[in-house]
Image: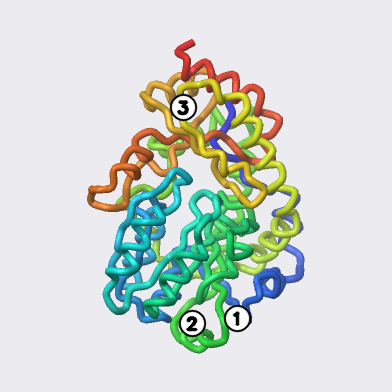
Amino acid sequence: MIPRHRPEYGLKDLLVALKPAEDCLCRISADLNRSFAMWVPSGRAGLSLLLRAVEAKAAIVPAFNCWAVIEGLAHASAEPVFVDIGQDLNADLNQTLCAIERASPGTVLILTHQFGIPICSASLLIEAARSKGMAVIEDGAAAVGGVSDVGPVGSAGDASVFSFQFTKSVLAGEGGLVLAGDQLATALKREGKDLRQRTRSESLSQWLKLAALTLFTNPRLYAFTLYRRVASVGTLNQKGSVAPAEVFEALPAPWMRNLASQTQSRLNAVLAARRRVASRYLEALRDLPVTMVPAVASPAAAPIRFPVLVENRNQVVRRCAGGGLDLGRSFSYVCSPGGFPRAEKVASQIVNLPLSQRLENCVPRTIEIFREAVLGG
């Protein structure tokens, strides 16, 4: 069975990561022209640290979003100010501009590049936020290696955050980076002073988890192993879920940082392969009664998902499973209480086709199964 995702590492990478290696922290911060960088337990923990560092009381975010973002806000006691989304699945430009204009003191703007699709109007949003004295945090959790209209993802605004969770293009299993200028360094060090090192048992547990993931996402084994245990709703971060305490407390172990360095060194090749796969999907599925997002294959994108909107999603998912393809559904929920029709439509119809470089040889079969499922074959 073709899995919904296969992480971009192998068992050899996990073994090599146990040996001392160069930390990618300085390399990434230098590439993005950030003078301060620090490891954090996760992307949501990094977002929480940044919100607390700028003393945020509220944050403007898209209603269609990963629940981890909402957890990060809650952990920092910041209220979400929701806006709807546009055709590229990022925050709608006009609604975001209106939200900036109406914002109360202490509100920050979070620029989320959904699924690695860079916001095409980041410069306008940053300019509007600056005119209101509003802090801007770039959420590059899923978009490392992408380029927006103001430059590489992670270089815009007052600060940025990346996630290195195992579904990302650069990964450490868990963990992430916070990047900022010198003006936020003191506040970030203060907010992060209680972060702790992982225990030996936590580190071993994570290593074994990643070993199992790379082994059991092999298409030959997936149906008999992980497929029986993955969330039936098709997404890891479910609405209303609560992450374990270590996600906000425990820093990545040295071997996890080494794994991030390894995967970061291969980032360009991984992204090129994912954009290539996305282009093949766009070409092969263009005659189907589905909605796709062409921007996912653009040279500026750093895609981690290939989103497709389908009618009768549950039926399509069942048909694909019967044919040997497991579809992801990120995200099958709206983070807001309601009132955002485009976000609600996307959440009710979205499926994700596999985009991993390590599953590129499965693309012809994926296309065949998906076409048959949509057309009712």
Q: Check disc 2 and give the amino acid type.
A: Leu
Is residue 42 visible in the rendered image? The answer is: no
Relative to 20, say whether 274 is above or below.
Answer: above
Q: Secondary structure at mark 3?
A: loop
Is residue 225 rendered to the left or right of residue 128?
right
Q: Earlier in the sequence, mark 1 or mark 2?
A: 1
x and y percent of residue 279 in the render? 65, 35
* Residue assigned mark 3: 290
- Give neighbour class at mark 3: few <14, some 14-19, many 20+ (Cα, 10 Å): some
x and y percent of residue 270 in the render? 70, 47
* Residue assigned mark 1: 36
Quadrant into which the N terminus falls: top right
Q: Secondary structure at mark 1?
A: strand
Q: Check disc 3 and give the amino acid type.
A: Val
Contact (Cβ within 8 Å) of mark 1 with mark 3: no
* Residue assigned mark 2: 188
Distance from label 1 to label 2 (Cα)?
9 Å
Nearest the eye: 220 or 25: 25
Nearest the eye: 252 or 142: 142
Contact (Cβ within 8 Å) of mark 1 with mark 2: yes
Q: For the point 47% across and 15% down, which residue is it?
A: 375
Question: Residue lying farthest top?
Answer: 377
Q: Earlier in the sequence, mark 2 or mark 3?
A: 2
x and y percent of residue 6 in the render? 61, 41
